[in-house]
Image (cartoon, helix red, strand yellow):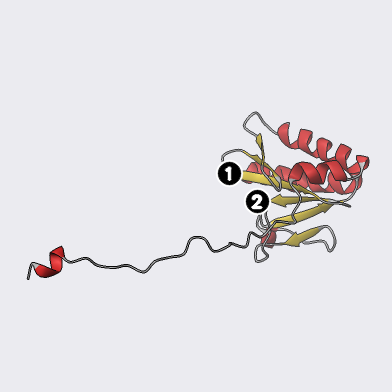
Amino acid sequence: MFDLINSNVATAFKDTNTEKVVKQSTDKTFDEQLETTSSKLIELYYSIRDYILALGDDVTENKLKLYSAFKKIKNIVCVEVRTKSIMLYLRLSPEDIVLENGFTRDVSKVEHWATGDLEVTIKNAKDFEKAKEYIDKAYEMN
């Protein structure tokens, strides 16, 4: 009976010298995206940023690797800068919004980096003016 307690038990040897394949991400960081976009979009991003931060003293910005998140307690708006547009991801239910093709989109069932179920595409100042309604609503509801 005690023979099993004192016996040596061999475990499988795992070779740790095998080469691991490291996948390099091709996604640009938020800062790289911002640096490589047009000066017009950079200016537009800072206008959006200033507008969101001015909503209240409880709004803070948290720059992450791939996007910038604006939050109260939870994220209310996440921003990704693309080559030709700025994408806002808002913590709003797309079911409560009349979606406009090319401007708003339901991404609740689509994988994306940022948090938020409503995607708003901003290409110019006019789009930003239209988006303010949704930004305000996301702030008020969260």
Find numbered disc 1 in the image and state the secondary structure of the residue it sits on.
Answer: loop
Query: Which circle marks residue 91 in the picture?
Result: 2
Q: Residues within 10 Å of mark 1 (few under 14, many from 20)?
A: few
In the displayed structure, 73 sits above or below 114; it is above
Q: Amino acid at mark 2?
A: Arg
One can see residue 74 in this view: yes
Q: Which residue is mark 1?
A: 74
Query: Which circle marks residue 54 in the picture?
Result: none
Residue pictured at 24% horizontal, 67% vertical = 9
Q: Please provide percent x and percent y for residue 77.
A: 69, 45
Q: Quadrant of the N terminus?
A: bottom left
Residue pictured at 80% horizontal, 39% vertical = 48
Find numbered disc 2 in the image and state the secondary structure of the residue it sits on.
Answer: loop
Q: Please provide percent x and percent y for residue 44.
A: 86, 40
**Is the Cβ of the residue at disc 1 closer than 8 Å to that at disc 2?**
yes
Front one among 95 and 8:
8
Residue pictured at 79% horizontal, 58% vertical = 104
Q: Amino acid at mark 1?
A: Lys
